[in-house]
Amino acid sequence: MSKRHHFDPLIEAITTARDPNALGEALESFAQAQGFQHFAYLRLDGSRWRAVSNYSEEWQDRYYVKDFSRIDPIVKAAKQGAHPFCWSLHDAILNRESKDVIAFRDEAIAHGIVAGLSIPIRVGFGHKAVLTFASSDTACLKDAVRMDIIEAAAAAAMLHFAFSLRRKRWSSGSASKLTPFETTCLSWVAEGKTMQDVADLLEEKYSRVRGSVDKARGKLDAVTLQQATAVAARLMLI
């Protein structure tokens, strides 16, 4: 029997996962087995980001409200690099960063995020995602530095596939909660109609159409209307 590798259990769990909760459980199980306490899959799309994580709700809420993805040094390194990398927020180089970054660093450490392994991947259309495993101390790095970077990238890519493409058949989430009117408006917009055109066609007020399209865009976690129609089409909602 061939030797098992670090990422084999995670890859196998991703392959057999039937819903997002199973993926989260697989990530948490893998993290703990490898000496990490936390995981975070962060998808970066322009000025918006989406994450799946087991960080504390308090930290996730603060990260979102403060838009910490703008200054997070790990996210910055993931955007600039192409290979998996180990990191520590105790790194002396961070002391030369801006006051905002240093404040972020100190707050992250206070929430038990000190060191970890991050795996950046390209996900197409000029975007990137990063899969991170983190811990409250640097002991996790001892084994992490010996992990195969090709296997790590393969696992991250499979996870991205599971979260982005398989959601077509997963009914949970805000995207599945588009109202019939929101779906109708978005469908007409996808056909090239302006919102005033849609209002005229449906004999509705412009304000209602505009409001419904904006709500649909928010539910789809899209930055622009063009992105919203693309996401809706990919999810087979229109």
Image: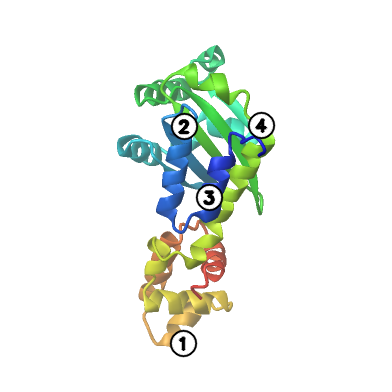
* Element type at mark 1: helix
Q: Which residue is mark 3?
A: 14
Q: Residues within 10 Å of mark 3 (few under 14, many from 20)?
A: many
Q: Mark 4 belongs to which amino acid?
A: Asp
Q: Which residue is mark 4?
A: 148
Q: Which residue is mark 1?
A: 201
11 relative to 119, above or below: below
Q: Are marks 3 and 4 in contact (CB under 8 Å)?
A: no
Q: Is residue 92 visible?
A: yes
Q: Residues within 10 Å of mark 2 (few under 14, many from 20)?
A: few
Mark sitting earlier along the chain (3/4): 3
Which marked residue is nearer to the observer: mark 2 or mark 1? 2
Which marked residue is nearer to the observer: mark 1 or mark 4? 4
Residue 172 in the image, given as x and y percentages of width and height: 39, 62
Q: Residue at x 46, y 26 (%)?
A: 35
Mark sitting earlier along the chain (2/1): 2
Judged from this view, the residue extending furthest toward the left is 58
Q: Residue at x 59, y 43 (%)?
A: 156
